[in-house]
Amino acid sequence: MTDSFAAGRAGSPMADSFAGRGIIVTGAAQGIGAAIAEYFVAREARVILMDLDADLAAATAAGLGENARAVGGDVSRRADVQRAVTACREHAGQVDVMVAHAGIADVRPLLDVTDEQWQRIFDVNVNGVFLCAQEAGRAMRHSGGGTIVVTASTNAVQVEENLVGYSASKGAVVTFVRAAALDLARHGIRINAVAPGVVNTRIARWVIEDPVLGPEYLKKIPLSRFAEPVDVARVVGFLAGPDSAYITGQTIVLDGGQTLGIPLEGVEVELPGQTRDPP
Ligand code: NAD
């Protein structure tokens, strides 16, 4: 076994730190991706923020300081992903971590989805993850290993109305991660996913800010709050670093307990034959 970052060798000077590591975060111009980039920059990593919105990515990177650089590009285009990998090598010497986070949602009923809408969801959410994992994986293979973290969603398992393309794409991502983990392990590369519930970013505001849907949705979350981007960033940091050195192919759900079951809001029931506890 190499003393690669993936192995997280105890006692290595880097074991507790991302300092100097080359990290790519896709979809990093705003929201969760920006929080993930900020998490790594705060730990002295050298971070490439890749995003379709090149101007916003540049502004976000500028706000994070000289260890952050922006690359405009579309994760569904191999040449763009390759540019991000090249930029990371130039910035940090190698690619140690790929966070394949960029993704899009589309809210409409199955019977209204067009071919183009379906194709775009899969191009970004599935093909983009494939391209990021493959291009980063090829770079990591030559530098002794690395880690890949992919953003899935609770929609991979707990589906909702009007999100058929999104849900199917995230289900594909979870299975991709399991299969990719088998192929990448021999190269010292781990790959895992995070599956957030509702996170307070622009793509979830239609739920969070709706005066009826927002409070109703909140009742289904045992921890009684929506996630903040930093909640996701911390789990991504765990999966990217040496503390998770023996975990691969897994999806960590962070949803405040939303997918555990059906909360009954303190309803008191008495089943036939059940004796009441003494007061
Ligand atoms: P966001 O829309 O605020 O940010 C997404 C960023 O990705 C944007 O800056 C956008 O420009 C960029 N992007 C979109 N398509 C791209 C492409 N083809 N190539 C490169 N960049 C692209 O949303 P967010 O919530 O911060 O992050 C979205 C990701 O998080 C998606 O993968 C989504 O499935 C996942 N997610 C979000 C939630 C949530 O409730 N917000 C929950 C679960 C999973």
Image (tube, rainbow, N blue to C red):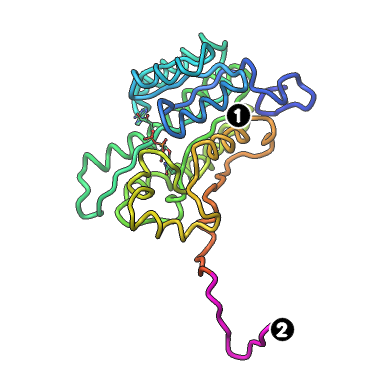
At label 2, counting other C-alpha atoms closer than 10 Å, the crowd grade (few under 14, some 14-19, many 20 or more) is few
Circle 2 SS class = loop
Quadrant housing residue 192: top right
Disc 1 Cβ-to-ligand 1 distance below 8 Å: no
Q: Report the residue marked by disc 1.
A: 189
What residue is at 51 percent from the left and 69 percent from the top? 264
At label 1, counting other C-alpha atoms closer than 10 Å, the crowd grade (few under 14, some 14-19, many 20 or more) is many
Q: Quick check: 114 above or below 23?
A: below
- Identify the image quadrant of the C terminus: bottom right
Q: What amino acid does circle 2 point to?
A: Pro
Circle 1 SS class = strand
Q: Quick check: 261 above or below 210?
A: below
Q: Nearer the viewer, residue 151 or 4?
A: 151
Q: Nearer the viewer, residue 171 or 72?
A: 72
| Magenta span | 266-279
Query: Would you say residue 126 sits in the magenta stretch?
Result: no
